Amino acid sequence: MACRFNGLPYYMYINCRCLFCISYIQTYIRELTFSSNTKMAMSPTAMVARRALAAASQGSHEGGARTWKILSFVLALPGVGVCVANVYMKMQAHSHDHPEFVPYPHLRIRTKPWPWGDGNHSLFHNAHTNPLPTGYEGPHH
């Protein structure tokens, strides 16, 4: 059976515990440890990578769901709350007036009328935000 991590970068294999991925991680650690031509001492970066990959290849799945549950409540929900507060504050500071209409010749070109309604309004026309070729429709709140 093929592993779902097959063909991905080496750091993605850390999350899998199948025999293929464990042997791939061990091979990668050996490549970090020794050069292909000569045996060399490992650099500090290679040593850190070796320790991280070796620890990941020996780990288990215990506590994975608990970790994601904690992260969801500690990071995701407050993050959504901050985004909601940001949008609310920006809406309070936003002016609801229309920008001045400038009839640019390359915008809102009508060569023939739309096949619905009066022929001048698009299918998803919003009178508050979409001007017609002649300008905005009447006064709004």
Image: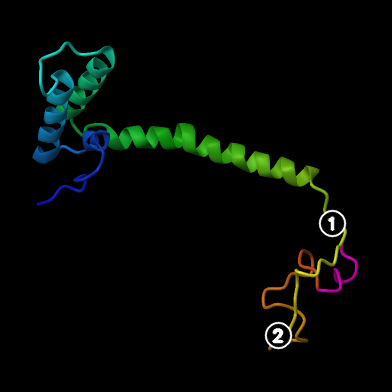
Q: Estimate how packed mark 1 is, as few (under 14), some (14 to 19) or many (20 or more) residues with alpha carbons within 10 Å.
A: few
Which residue is located at x 17 percent, y 10 percent? 41
Reading the image, the residue beneath label 2 is 114
Q: Are marks 1 and 2 in contact (CB under 8 Å)?
A: no
Which amino acid is tagged 2?
Trp
| In-front residue for pair 99/79 | 99
Name the main secondary structure of what is drawn in magenta.
loop
Q: Is residue 105 left or right of residue 78?
A: right
Label ID, residue 125: none
The region drawn magenta spans 133-141
Q: Is residue 97 left or right of residue 19?
A: right
Which residue is located at x 67 percent, y 44 percent? 87
Which residue is located at x 82 percent, y 74 percent? 133
Looking at this view, name the residue that lies furthest to the right: 139
- Residue 30's quadrant in the figure? top left
| In-front residue for pair 5/110 | 110
Reading the image, the residue beneath label 1 is 99
Quick check: is 134 in the magenta stretch?
yes
Which amino acid is tagged 1?
Pro
Residue 79: x %, y % from top left = 54, 37
Pick whichever of labels 1 and 2 is earlier in the sequence: 1
Residue 88: x %, y % from top left = 70, 44
| In-front residue for pair 50/67 | 50
Which residue is located at x 27 percent, y 12 percent? 44
Q: Is residue 15 left or right of residue 88?
A: left
